[in-house]
Amino acid sequence: MKFPQMPYTRPQYDEVSAKLTEILEKFKTAASAEECFAAYKEYDEYNGYLFSMFAIARIRNTLDTNDEFYDKEKTYMDEVSPKLQSVYQAFTQALLDTPFRKDLEAKWGNLLFVNAEMNLKTFSPEIVPDMQEENKLRSEYSKLIASAQIKFDGKTLTLAQLRPYYENPDKAVRVAAIEAASAWYLSNAEKLDGLFDELVQIRTRMAKKLGHDNFVQLGYYRMQRNCYDANLVAKFREGVIKHIVPVAKRLKDEQAKRIGTTTPLKMHDDFFEYPEGNAKPMGTPDEIFAHGKKMYHELSEETAEFIDFMLENELFDVLTRPGKQAGGYCSHIPIYRSPFIFANFNGTSGDIDVLTHEAGHAFAGYLARDIYPSALRRYSMETAEIHSMAMEFFTWPWMEGFFGDQTQKYYYSHLASALTFIPYGTMVDEYQHHIYEKPNMSPKERNQLWLELESKYRPWLNLEGTDFYGQGRRWQSQGHIFSSPFYYIDYCLAQIMALSFWAQNQKNPSDAWAKYRRLLGFAGTKTFVELIEDAGLPSPFVPNNLKDVADAAVEWLDKQ
């Protein structure tokens, strides 16, 4: 079904709660394994309907944050979702306690139960009001960012529409664009400080109610960290500082020489990679999608089927417009077995990432749509980001159709930026650990912490000044810090895996694709560590592996 035609009906809390409770009783009183399986199937299907209704409403709310109907639906969901957790948690407990657990494990494996045990540690009824308030504040942040109306170049622009000016060959334009964005953020600085402080206090309060010293462990449970802990992530960060930061610094030094300056770079030069301008895609959005369709038809039979399904059912919304939420994402609508891709085209190479990165997420979801139970379709986020980031590299052979004579420049920038991103993403993670370990920091202390981490992870930048960046407020534009604490390290772990797939693809494309396709096929039936072992990928928690991955990429870059 085409997305605009998908019907939405608000799931009424009383009806939903009663229905879930009824199914729960069937599950708890099952007299045989067959009855237990049947009750779980009913629960799974009903939950798929609820998830689909919530997904449709959320997507339509992000498409136009000014739409009053879906704004009210989003507010309703923010209030109701935490209340439903009591029933969901009761079902999770029943799943763990059922006398037919061995029968279920024999059929579905043990990971479903490992994740269920972890999920129980994230909730108790007393934190429902806190969860509701957290949802409300997340929505406030998204609406605030989407509301930006910035006068620039004779136009009124959103933050996403302003972004291409950061790459303009005219330095004066770049400087003015950075200053315009900085001014908007500074005009909302007090509001952003307040929103974040409330989120930190609420999350800390929830953690303490659940028996934790601070939010860090609860955050890990909520991110379904089922095969590694904060100590291993700390080892990864150490490896990044030792092996990736020096490589990134060298690449930034080379960028500075190309554009006629030196490091440390000012922010208006950090985004600017070539004196004649960064690689930009050719053509209109329709032409870009036409080549994207050709690309996926030639990549494999399965990707051909997938892209036809996406386009025929209007499962993309990529054009930037006032009121549309910033950023990009991929969502899934179970009852229609459909992924949905949301993005904001802005005329940069990032537009092509929509057809590679977000489509990597969507393709993985498309392949997993028939896995049962549905809980095993859902992979942890670092696994999801392998799907997307590796797809960016597997589609390299078709980039000439997007970039023409700028293709080689795109390849270089894409690979180099994969390396320079890792320190930034790792910095975001360390920042959040410090924030939640010391939740009573003042706004000034939080900004100062960010500046200290910038000098540690990105020594190629000059952030002196009193603007948004100079005050150490760059973190306020990173939505994940507000909405999804501890998510951002997933991108960094996955980037190492994607670079490993890239290296394999340089030597043996068919073998690399086969390993990638196998990894996708497991969906959520294996942990992140199990998946990378199965694919023969290097563990990111072994520092020397990071060096090997970086060296392989730099060797290729040096030859260009």
Image (tube, rainbow, N blue to C red):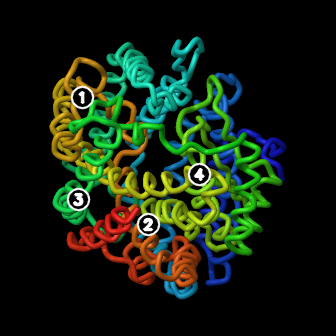
Q: Do the residues labelled 4 and 2 touch (CB within 8 Å)?
A: no
Whole-number angstrom distance, CA of label 4 to CA of label 2 = 25 Å
| N-term-proximal mark, 1 vs 3 | 3
Tell me the number on the disc at residue 472. 1
Element type where label 1 sits in the image? loop
Nearer to the camera, 544 or 49: 544
Residue at 39% across, 49% down: 124
| N-term-proximal mark, 1 vs 2 | 1
Q: Name the residue under label 4.
A: 405
Whole-number angstrom distance, CA of label 1 to CA of label 3 = 22 Å
Quadrant in the picture for residue 205? top left
Tell me the number on the disc at residue 498. 2
Residue 328 x %, y %: 56, 43
Q: Which amino acid does label 3 sit on?
A: Val
| N-term-proximal mark, 4 vs 3 | 3
Looking at the image, is mark 1 or mark 4 nearer the viewer?
Answer: 4
| N-term-proximal mark, 3 vs 2 | 3
Residue at 55% across, 40% down: 348
Looking at the image, is mark 1 or mark 2 nearer the viewer?
Answer: 2
Nearer to the camera, 74 or 424: 424
Residue 367 x %, y %: 66, 70
Tell me the number on the disc at residue 240. 3
Looking at the image, is mark 4 or mark 3 nearer the viewer?
Answer: 4
Q: What residue type is labelled 2?
A: Ala
Rendered position, 427 above or below 102: above
